[in-house]
Amino acid sequence: SQTIHQWPATLVQPVGSPLSLECTVEGTSNPNLYWYRQAAGRGLQLLFYSVGIGQISSEVPQNLSASRPQDRQFILSSKKLLLSDSGFYLCAWGRGDTEAFFGQGTRLTVV
Amino acid sequence: DQQVKQNSPSLSVQEGRISILNCDYTNSMFDYFLWYKKYPAEGPTFLISISSIKDKNEDGRFTVFLNKSAKHLSLHIVPSQPGDSAVYFCAASAEGTYKYIFGTGTRLKVLA
C-alpha cells in the first residue's frame, strides 16, 4: 500500500533563517506530488506541484521554492523565512484523475 | 481568484440529523470533484468523489451531488455523528491539469 511521510511535524524558525521540509512517498512510482499551505481563512492553497523528477510548477509567487530530486521525494525550501510564511504545510501525492493523499502536515511558526 | 468556493465557514447540526455542505466552482473545465475531511493538526483525509459524468455518488452515510449547470456540488451526511465534527474541504480538478484546487473549508460541528 502507498504511504506518504512528511517531516518535521512542527517547526519554529526565526525570521531570515532557511527552511527545508521533506516529503517522501512509498508504494507507488511516478506520482504527482504537491505542496499545499493551509493559512487562516485561506483554505488549502496549492503552492507547487510536480509531475516528474526535476519538473516543478509554481502556483503562487512567494518566498518558497520546491525541488524533486528523486521520483518519490519532494522538498519545500526557503532561503530566508518571512513572518508571513507561517502556516500549516501539507504534502500530497495523486494521479490527477483520482483522489490525492496527504501527509500529516508540518506546523511552521516563524518568529 | 477563488475557483472553488465554500461560502459557509461553519455549520452546526444536531446529532442524527442531516448535514449539508455546499461548494461552488467557476471553472467549467473541472471534471472531477472531491470532498475531504480534516481534523486540526492533521492532513486531510479523502471522503468521496464524483466525476462530471455523474450527478450523484453514495458511500455509506456520505452522498455527493453534482449540478453541472449550476456549477454546484454538495455533500450530505446522514445521519450526522459527533465524530463527523471537522473541517470539510471540497476540491476540483480538470483533466490533464494534474492540479487539485481546494475551497476554503466549512467547519462542521455535530452537537450531541
Image (spheres, rainbow, N blue to C red):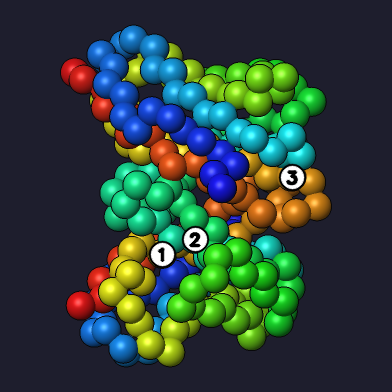
Figure quadrant of the N terminus of chain A:
bottom right
Q: Report in which chain the residue with disc 1 lies.
A: A
Q: Amino acid at mark 3?
A: Ala
User: Is circle 1 on the same chain as circle 3?
Assistant: no
Figure quadrant of the C terminus of chain A:
bottom left
Q: Amino acid at mark 2?
A: Tyr
- Left of B91 or right of it: where is A40? left
State how far apart marks 2 and 1 are (Cα).
6 Å
Earlier sequence position, callout 2 versus callout 1: 2
Q: Tell me the residue at 42%/48% (across/down).
A: A43
- Left of A68 or right of it: where is A107? left
**Residue A64 visible from this viewpoint:** yes
In this view, the residue in front, A27 or B5, is B5
Give yes or no for contact between labels 2 and 1 (Cβ–Cβ under 8 Å): yes
- Name the residue carrying label 3: B94
- Name the residue carrying label 2: A36
- Tag 3: Cα neighbours inside 10 Å, few (<14), some, or many (≥20)? some
- Left of B67 or right of it: where is A21? left
